[in-house]
Amino acid sequence: MLPASKHIFGIHSVTPYQLTDGMPYGIIKVLSGASLELTGELVKLNGGSYAYSWAVEDGYKSGTLNFKPQQYEEFMFELFLGKAPTKSGTGSGSVTTLTNFNGTSVSDASTGIASIGVLSGSSSNLKAGKYMVKAVDATTVDLYNLTDFDFSRGTDTTYVDETLKITSAALTVSDSGATTDVADFGLQITGGSGVVALTADDTAYFEVKPPASSDYVVKLGAASDRTPEFGAYLTTEPRGNGESFAIDCYRCRAIGMPFNFEAKNFSEAEIKSEVLYDSSEDAVCQVRWIRPTSPV
């Protein structure tokens, strides 16, 4: 009698691990699929008038581990894009440093805006986004926000007009470090230490993070960004009889992680990694099949 055939069903997880000590970077469990492709070439000897090959020998072989995660963890940026994010909990919310974009007069500790920060007691009104500050004249500015997805947080707000302005009237930047509040957005503008003298149409920007338990930020594309090699341990979903496969790819390297955005759909990336030869194991991977005496 033939034994029961062996089958692969589903995908359970992909766990990248460090090559230095074998410790995991983390686990990827929200996946729509994965595949390990071990392929090779046959080098054929053809010649003369005969239609078929005279001889065939092994050519180059390659291994590719592809998987489709639907989660975006911090370690994935380091492994697939070459830059580890900075992670922190923002607590009561935060505002990044005001930075000049066009001209130099808006962000100026003496004659412009010294800082923009969180208005005391109004952190619940902080609305996420990238903000632009535009000088209207020597002493006033308008505020703009590049997105309105968070406008219902705290006090409901809306754009003033199609320019994405959020202030109905120009805000005065006061002399001698005096402050101006933008309460509906949880912001406070502090004027320069001297006499304010802005240049009309100069701009600056800042970003706002509302109160949060955790967040991360990462800048991608620096010339020094490099993706590291890693190991990858892949497991299938256990079948009803407990049968499962596990594949250990000893050395992998990947470059690239797409961000896909579709209406009313969760984002899914496709990671393509090359599987390399490991001299200490004398292999590129190990495949293990298990059929337990009893299912879990």
Image (spheres, grey):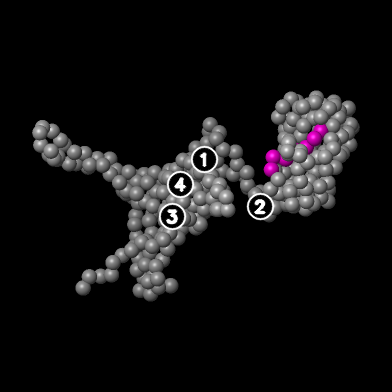
Left or right: 8 in relation to 207: left
Label 3 SS: strand
Label 2 SS: loop
Residue to which mark 2 is pinned: 214
Alpha carbon of mark 3 to alpha carbon of mark 4: how far?
A: 11 Å
Q: Quadrant of residue 175?
A: top right
Residue to which mark 4 is pinned: 271
The circle on residue 33 is 3
Residue 20 visible, this orientation: no
Task: Tell me which label, 2 or 4, sits earlier in the chain.
Answer: 2
Q: Are marks 2 and 4 in contact (CB under 8 Å)?
A: no
User: Along the line of sight, which residue is nearer the eye, 204 or 76?
Assistant: 204
Indicate the position of residue 115 as horizontal and vertical percent values: 79, 36
Task: Tell me which label, 1 or 4, sits earlier in the chain.
Answer: 1
Of circles 3 and 1, the one toward us is 3
Of circles 2 and 4, the one toward us is 4
User: Along the line of sight, which residue is nearer the eye, 234 or 39?
Assistant: 39
The amino acid beneath tag 2 is Ser
Q: Is residue 17 rendered magenta in the image?
A: no
